[in-house]
Structure formats: structure tokens, C-alpha cells
Image: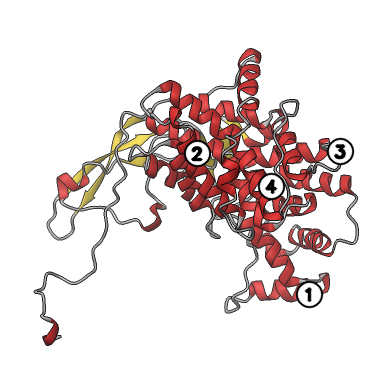
Amino acid sequence: MADRQNTNSFTLTNNQTGESVDLPILEGSVGPGVIDVRALYANTGHFTFDPGFGVTGSCKSALTFIDGDEGKLMHGGYSIDELAEKSDFLEVAYLLLNGELPNKAEKEEFDYAITHHTMVHEQLVNFFRGFRRDAHPMAILCGVTGALSAFYHDSTDINDPVQQMVASRRLIAKMPTLAAMAFKYSMGQPFNYPRNDLNYAENFLHMCFSVPTETYEVDPVLADAMDKILILHADHEQNASTSTVRLAGSSGANPFACIAAGIAALWGPAHGGANEAVLTMLDEIGDRSRIPEYINKARDKNDPFRLFGFGHRVYKNFDPRAKVMRDSCHEVLNKLGIKDEPLLDLAMELEEIALKDPYFIEKKLYPNVDFYSGIILKAMGFPTSMFTVLFAVARTVGWISQWKEMIEDPLQRIGRPRQLYTGPTERSYVEMDKR
């Protein structure tokens, strides 16, 4: 549904001069209206100031809607919990790319196309060998993704709809392969080729955990948990990495470079590293007996300790993804029969306290999706260095869908934020011997 201009407008008045300007209010299909400030500078000579763009709408989008107060996340109008229960990751990917759920024939064609694009160019193996053995998997993934345009230059013309489609499918298909290769490289193990008889999540687990010396059977419970992790992280509106992809794409950069830019932004600990921070926090706590001590530290405003994995910047009441992830987390732990694993035992104890403790309840510090996903990935056998890599595998679908939407938007312009200059005023150059 397209945005529409309301009959209402917002009047901005300069208290010094008495001059005023009427700014139209635009309404989306759902959610709060936005004040259209595009004519502000032309009419007043002033810009807006919004560090971090926290209250600025940078684009129109029909992909994802978040209501933080109500705890809602929807893709194309479908709630995330319903998609996680009834759909699979590639169906969600199709929805984000095309705006509608596929019929049976469309789903089969899309699944086939993604499955048969999972192999990467064999010369990429040589590219991997250029990295140090102890390189962080995110560093590898970022570099290799950016290099894809050198291998697949037949799908870099952003003005060709066919090339757009091919590049989109290639990125969705090949990202798990590249992520698994980064994982294997960090361990000194041989790369595994993808298998066309496995689905998306199964294939990723196979490429990560199978070895030539043994037969590897993908556990359906683990595959289902991985599929849900991918669905829950597929897209999350205009976050830092998505905005980075759009900003890079606004210059006309090829899609492989844009996704590499998104990976670089995701790597930041304030963005994609939250589930890794959960495990680091649990390591610091160390033992169940120390939980009360650390809860008191969290309550102390003067203590630098922070609780990771509880509450959410966007969701003010609860994270709609967390319940799905919680159920999946307990299924994985029960299936694997993990006992006497101190870190996971500690996590489950902390979860139980968080759901009952008055401090957590009052502050709305509910366990969020990062808390549970970190525990699941740890139980599966992934090191913490791979957590953000898996996030990137899932979010590639959202990034490429947002990039595609941006390319097709006739209002799109190259990103060029303004600034509030606070440096020196104009001054004359001073010769070296007079400074």
C-alpha cells in the first residue's frame, strides 16, 4: 500500500522571526505518520539534527514493520511468530523479495534455483588461502563477499532486472557456503561441497559439521532450530547494517559490494555481536552461586557491568522472536541431552530468575532473541566467533530485499546526510615559523 498525504500538516514556527512553514504529514499503511521535511531547507534555510537518525525516516519500505510498544514484527503483513511456525526460511526469503507468499509452483522453482546456486567458483578456494589461519570468520566473510563481484561480473548491472534477480539469488544461495568455508578454514578442516538433496538449513549444518572421515546425519531438531534462527533474523527494518546496504547501494555500487558493506556494519559489537556478548557475560558470571551478585551489579547504576540478552532497544515490552527461540532452545537442549554443561546450566538458571524476579519484570528485562540464539548455537557446537557470521547468513535475505526495493524506488537519491558544523570559523593560514 502506497503512502498517502494526510489533510493535516505540521506547522513549524521560528520564535525569533515569527516565520512559519507548513510541512505535510504522510501516512503509511500502518504505524505513526511522518513529517515530510524535504522542503524544509528550501523554505527556511535550516536542516534537521538527528544523531543516529533515530527519529528520521530515510526511505519508504513495504517489507518489514516493527511496533516496539506492542512487540510486533511483521514481514509483508505476516507476523513473525506465524511465519516461524508455519513457513520455512526460503519461503520467507521469497516473501521479502517479492512481497507475496509463493504458490506451490513458485516455491518449487525458487527452492530449486537457490539449491542449485549454492556452489561457489572453485578459484575462491585460493582466495581463502590468502587469509591467516587465525583470521576472524567475519573478516573472511566480509572480504570474500566483496570479492564475489570479481567472479560473477555477469550479474553486477543494477539497471538490468534479470541481473538483479540473478545476483539476489546467488547471494542468498552462496552465503551459507561462504560462511561454512570461513568456519572450516578457521579450524584447519577441508571445505565441504553443498548437497542438492538437503534443504537450506540442513545443507548449512552439513557444510559446517561433516568431515570426510565420518558419515554425518543432519539432526532434524537441529535443522529446524537453525531454520527458525534464520527466519527470525531475516530482516529487521532500517537497522545499522540495512541502512549501510541502502547507503552503499544509493551510489550505484554492485550488490556484492553492498552486502559486504552490510556485513562490515553487522560486525560491530553494538549491532550483530549481541548473542556473542551473552556468552561472554555468562563466562564472566561463571557459576550459578554468583547470579545474585551479578544481578545486584546490574541494579547498581555506578557499576559498569551490563546484562546482555535481556530487554531490547526497539521492543519496549517483549521481543516477539524470543518466545519462538525459547521453545526451540529447550527442544535443542533436550534433544542433545546436554548435562553438566556449566555455561548452559547457568543460562537456564538466569532465564528462570529473569522471568520471575521483580527487578527484571519491572524493568521489562525479558530474555530476548539474542539470549536464546547464543545458547542454541553454543549447544550446536559453534564457537562464539561464528555467531555473527550466522546472523549475516540470515540477514543477507533482508539486505538484498532492501537493496532491490531501493533500486526500484523512483524517489531514491544518493545518500547525503547533512551536518551541524562545530569547527573553527574561517581563518588565515599561519606560516610555520610563526606558529
Callouts 4 and 2 close, C-beta under 8 Å? no
Residue 118: which numbered mark, if any?
Answer: none
Q: Is residue 301 above or below residue 314?
A: below
Percent coordinates x, y for residue 414 in the rendering: 30, 41
Residue that mark 3 sits on: 215
> Hey, what amino acid is under mark 4?
Ala
Vertical placement of residue 416 versus 148, above or below: below
Q: Is residue 133 above or below residue 26?
A: below
In the image, residue 288 lies at what x, y percent? 82, 69
Q: Does the CB distance between marks 2 and 3 fall below 8 Å? A: no
Local secondary structure at mark 1: helix
Circle 4 or circle 3, nearest the eye: 3
* Residue that appears at 38% across and 44% down: 247
The reply, left or right, for residue 20 in relation to residue 373 is left
Q: Which of marks 1 and 3 is nearer the N terminus?
A: 3
Q: How far apart are marks 2 and 3 (CA)?
A: 31 Å
